[in-house]
Image: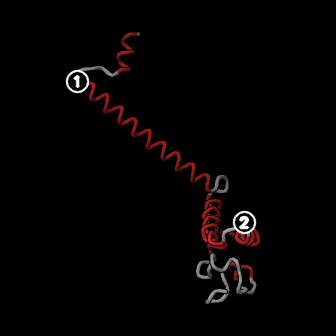
Amino acid sequence: MNMSGRCAACKYLRRRCPSDCILSPYFPSSDPQRFTSVNRIYGASNVAKMLQELIMPHLRAEAAETLRYEAQCRIQDLIYGCIGVISQLYINKYKIYTECRLAKTRAEIALMNSDGQEPPQAQVDQQI
């Protein structure tokens, strides 16, 4: 049990916080919103089961943080959740890559023009 009493999960569920509460280390009473969002998406019993069933208990903190992040993303974007964030990051990465390729191509064209050469595309257009 927490030193300050019940954890956020037990407070939310209006129950006594047992000394072996699986949720207590990951949902402290000082941050009730953390549990509220996870409970809203997954449900308290499902979260407790997921944390309890982890084969390696040292990974429970990371799992609880992942559940919190995914729940927050799902609350903010009901359709895509965290996949929406991942997609946006991918789009941004592709945009940056494309902008770099464009800058490189423009620099090559400028270099060719300064040497008196025409860009390869212009040479092809003239042949047609």
Q: Which quarter of the picture shows residue 52? A: bottom right
User: Where does the image place residue 30, in percent across and percent down from the top left?
Assistant: 59, 81
Reading the image, the residue beneath label 1 is 115
Q: Are marks 2 and 1 in contact (CB under 8 Å)?
A: no
Q: Is residue 46 above or below residue 113?
A: below
Q: Circle 1: is it few (<14), some (14-19), or many (20+) Cα within 10 Å?
A: few
Residue at 62% x, 52% y is 83
- Pick whichever, 59 or 24, lies toward us: 59
Cα separation, mark 2 vs mark 1, equals 64 Å
Q: Residue at x 57, y 54 (%)?
A: 85
Q: Amino acid at mark 1?
A: Asp
Q: Earlier in the sequence, mark 2 or mark 1?
A: 2
Q: Is residue 27 left or right of residue 116?
A: right
Residue, far top: 128
**Whether residue 74 is situated above or below residue 44 in the rendered picture:** above
Q: How is the image coloured?
A: secondary structure
Q: Residues within 10 Å of mark 2 (few under 14, many from 20)?
A: some
For the residue labelled by badge 2, is the local secondary structure a helix, a strand or a loop? helix
Q: Quadrant of the C terminus?
A: top left
Q: Classify residue 5 by image quadrant.
A: bottom right
66 lies above or below 80: below
The residue depicted at 31 percent of the width and 30 percent of the height is 108
**Measuring 28% from the left and 29% from the top, which residue is drawn there?**
110
- Provide the secondary structure element on which disc 1 rests: loop
Q: Position of residue 51 (x, y in %)?
A: 70, 70
Label for residue 56?
A: none
Q: Quadrant of residue 57?
A: bottom right
x, y percentage for residue 79?
A: 67, 53
Instruction: Inspect the image, locate mark 2, and give the three-letter code of the amino acid beneath it.
Output: Tyr
Q: Which residue is mark 2?
A: 42
Q: Which of the image's four quarters has the N terminus?
A: bottom right
> In this image, 115 relative to 47: left or right?
left
